[in-house]
Amino acid sequence: MSRKKIQILMVSLTMFGVAFQGIAQESKQIDKQKLDALVSTKIAMDKSGDFKEHYTIQIFYGERNKAIATKRQYDALDHKWKSELTWEHPYHKICVGTYRSRLEAERALIKIKEKYSNALILKP
């Protein structure tokens, strides 16, 4: 390589390095107070359920006595999902779990359907 080409190459690499260094050193400061306020607001909204969209699995819908028996039977299986007995006129229903996404609910439904074949996913 000629001396001129080497000089042009060195100047080009130097310019590229300076430009890259300027980009790499750019940073943004995050205000800790604003971040703390945002996190506390998010926690409060999670607790109150302001923007919760969730799914649940219904394993039974029918008479009160059968609903209570089904709930006891489910609770005895010791699944990790909590069951809840509610009354929706004119019948009682048992819903299991609270899932953040449909995919999470479908994964649980596969296990629950082994015992409760009529189970279905609800979006209350």
Image (tube, rainbow, N blue to C red):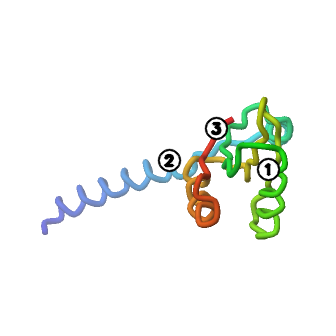
Secondary structure at badge 3 equals loop
> Callout 3 environment at 10 Å: few (<14), some (14 to 19), or many (20+)?
few
Disc sitting over residue 117 in the figure? none
Disc 1 residue type? Answer: Ala
- Indicate whether 80 appears above or below 61: below
Disc sitting over residue 123 in the figure? 3
Secondary structure at badge 2 equals helix
The one nearer the camera, 99 or 4, is 99
Disc sitting over residue 23 in the figure? 2
Q: Are marks 2 and 1 in contact (CB under 8 Å)?
A: no
Label 1: which residue?
67
Query: Which quadrant of the rendered structure holds the N terminus?
Result: bottom left
Residue at point 17% right, 60% down? 5
The one nearer the camera, 41 or 62, is 62
Q: In the drawing, does residue 68 fall left or right of residue 17? A: right
| One can see residue 34 in this view | no
Residue at point 73% right, 52% down? 96
Disc 2 residue type? Answer: Ile
The one nearer the camera, 58 or 81, is 58
> Callout 2 environment at 10 Å: few (<14), some (14 to 19), or many (20+)?
few
First along the sequence among labels 1 and 3 = 1
Most distant residue in the left direction: 2
Q: Position of residue 44 (x, y in %)?
A: 86, 37
| One can see residue 72 in this view | yes
